[in-house]
Image (tube, grey):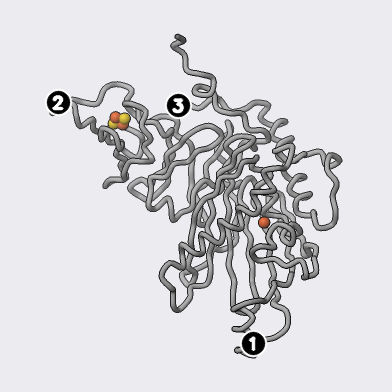
Amino acid sequence: MSLAGSASETSPPQVSQLAQNCWYAVASSFAFRKGPVAVPFAGHDFVLFPDAEGLPRLFSDRCPHRGASLALGQLEEGGCLRCPFHGWKFAADGTCLEAPAEPAGASPPARSDLVGERPAVESRGFIWMWWGSGPPDPALLPDLPVFPDEAWGHVESSFDWETHYSRVIESNLDNSHAYWVHKGTFASQDSPLSVPVDLRKEDRMIAATVSFELPVKGALKLLRTLSGQSGPLCATTTFSFYYPNLNIVDTSIGDQLRFIFFNASLPQSDTHTLARWVKYSKRKRFRLPGSEAQSIAISRTIFEEDHGVVRSQRPTPVPLDLTQERHVASDILSIEYRRMHRRWLSSEAAVTMARPEPLGS
Ligand code: FES
Ligand SMILES: [Fe+2]
């Protein structure tokens, strides 16, 4: 019997097109405040938690004692983290403070501190992890638009995609699939298609807007008739993307409804992406019991509709050579995403010439 672990235990999966030297959104601020939070990323496991000042700390998610996940543990006073297995306690800088089963007065053994710390900052509703061998550059933090204020409610959840993170990002930039993929939920093939307009491009941001009509049927039709509303129900969606992994989908329906959806795509492998999402909507005066669970369930159904098709796309990473797939006017955002991604990957190769050292975990 070999004493070495299997390859899958010892070497993280390779993730193609994994952008280096940039900030990845890895968890919402809401989840972070409740912490600790597991942050699986490209075959590595991290634990995220707030220190005594509420600042994010991110370490390898392995207890030095017996390898339990500290993300299953609990936060304690002073920004400390307690392991769920035998109760070892760690300070926010990773120092092991207590090993409770040791005789009274004994110090924790050598090499019992947390390892593999990575830079992390909180900004605009998310925790961002620096990934790369270069020094963290605050100027590269994505400049998200101002966040919804107290008048907005939110729900959040996650979704596992069986594909590369670039395909998830593109599906959140793509409008023209709605009529074919989402006809069971919110889209209608009777409505005219529209191409994105008002394209905005910056170095690491793209955005464009589409307008469309929603089907009016059932209870909604009755409600609109009773309130004297007639004609099509018009909606507008602005799709934005902030490099390397955050999509925003901002939808207004008629004059009444607006919801803003933030989606962070965490690369795991070429065939697995963990999406963490937050959906904001204007707070309603009366909130029915179970409405949050229902809101999450609706989003999940829509993702499952997407996933049924997106996981079939090959190759799983998007082709960066634009001649490899055919493009039409409605693909403008995915074309711009591929250009941006290719630009970043090629410039980083020129600058760094190397991948980061393996983490000390
Ligand atoms: S595994 Fe963490 S205290 Fe034992
Ligand atoms: Fe979709």
Q: CA distance from mark 3 to mark 1?
A: 62 Å
Query: Furthest-top residue in view?
Result: 1
Q: Amino acid at mark 2?
A: Pro
- Between label 3 and label 1, give the one nearer the viewer: 1
Q: Which residue is mark 2?
A: 103
Q: Which image quarter has ligand 1?
A: top left
Give the mark nearest the N terminus, 3 or 2. 2
Which kind of residue does numbered mark 1 sit on? Thr
315 vs 134, nearest the viewer? 315
Residue 49 horizontal/vertical position (percent)? 39, 44
Ligand 1 near label 2 (Cβ, under 8 Å)? no
Q: Are marks 3 and 2 in contact (CB under 8 Å)?
A: no
Q: Which residue is drawn at the image coordinates 66% and 29% (left, top)?
A: 352
Amino acid at circle 3: Ser
Q: Residue 361 shows which numbered tag? A: 3
Q: Quadrant of residue 286?
A: bottom left
x, y percent for residue 169 = 66, 49
Q: Which residue is mark 1?
A: 225
Q: Residue 23 at x, y = what percent?
A: 57, 43
Residue at 77 percent across and 70 percent down: it is 191
First in sequence: mark 3 or mark 1?
Answer: 1
Image quadrant occupied by the N terminus: top left
Q: Between tags 1 and 2, which lies in front?
A: 1
